[in-house]
Image (cartoon, grey):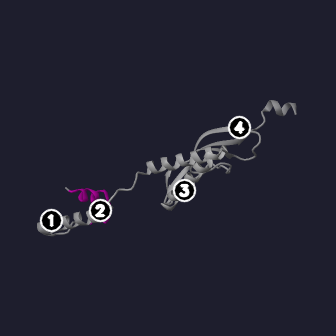
């Protein structure tokens, strides 16, 4: 049984499609045509792996953040190179999303690495993005990793003394 036959058996009987009743030469011709079509439809070079794109975008993001912290002359030139590289990746459909300072709720599609108590916040807030979310043509290829600050609640002991 062919792979196509196996795929048909996975479907409910009402949705199975009977194989066409062609002669052997017609099947051979069809296979040859499909093979030729597949070869012409394939791009000359395969696109880079999503994980490689995500890793490159993440490293660019980290470099930009590090350069933003320092203010030396060499940093301005490096920042310009990074900005140019980031614009080129954006033109290719790659988007990097930082979550610092955004409110957090349980339905967000991010990986929380750590919840930390913080008396200064009133709602759960992302205080640090460890790894950004990366999208390629609006398809997420890397999930963000964040640290979330949670409002501190006073303990019963503190309430009894107040």
Please identify the quadrant where the N terminus is shown.
bottom left
Q: CA distance from mark 2 to mark 1?
A: 28 Å
Identify residue for label 4.
Answer: 117
Above or below residue 15? Residue 151 is above
- In front: label 3 or label 4: 3
Q: On the image, which quarter does residue 62 sit in?
A: top right
Identify residue for label 3.
Answer: 84
Furthest-right residue in this view: 162
Q: CA distance from mark 3 to mark 2?
A: 56 Å
| Magenta stretch, residue numbers | 2-17
Above or below residue 71? Residue 44 is below
Q: Which numbered circle lies on residue 28?
A: 1
- Upstream in sequence: badge 2 or badge 1: 2
Above or below residue 46? Residue 121 is above
Q: Position of residue 144 (x, y in %)?
A: 56, 47
Mark 4 element type: strand
Q: Is residue 18 magenta?
A: no
Q: Is the residue marked by circle 1 packed among few (<14), some (14-19), or many (20+) residues within 10 Å? A: few
Q: Position of residue 37 (x, y in %)?
A: 26, 66
Identify residue for label 2.
Answer: 13
Q: Which numbered circle lies on residue 140?
A: none
Residue located at (59% from left, 48% from top): 64
Above or below residue 157? Residue 12 is below
């Amino acid at each position: 049984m062919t792979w196509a036959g196996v795929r048909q058996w996975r479907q409910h009987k009402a949705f199975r499609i009977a194989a066409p009743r062609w002669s052997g030469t017609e099947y051979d011709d069809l296979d040859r045509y499909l093979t030729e079509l597949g070869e012409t439809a394939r791009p000359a070079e395969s696109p880079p792996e999503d994980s490689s794109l995500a890793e490159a975008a993440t490293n660019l993001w980290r470099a930009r953040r590090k350069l933003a912290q320092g203010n030396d002359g060499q940093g301005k030139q490096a920042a310009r190179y990074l900005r140019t590289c980031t614009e080129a990746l954006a033109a290719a459909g790659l988007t990097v999303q930082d979550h610092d300072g955004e409110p957090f709720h349980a339905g967000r599609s991010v990986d929380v690495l750590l919840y930390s108590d913080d008396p200064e916040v009133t709602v759960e807030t992302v205080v640090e993005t460890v790894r950004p979310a990366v999208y390629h043509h609006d398809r997420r290829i890397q999930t963000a990793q964040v640290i979330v600050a949670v409002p501190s609640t006073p303990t019963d002991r503190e309430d009894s003394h107040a």
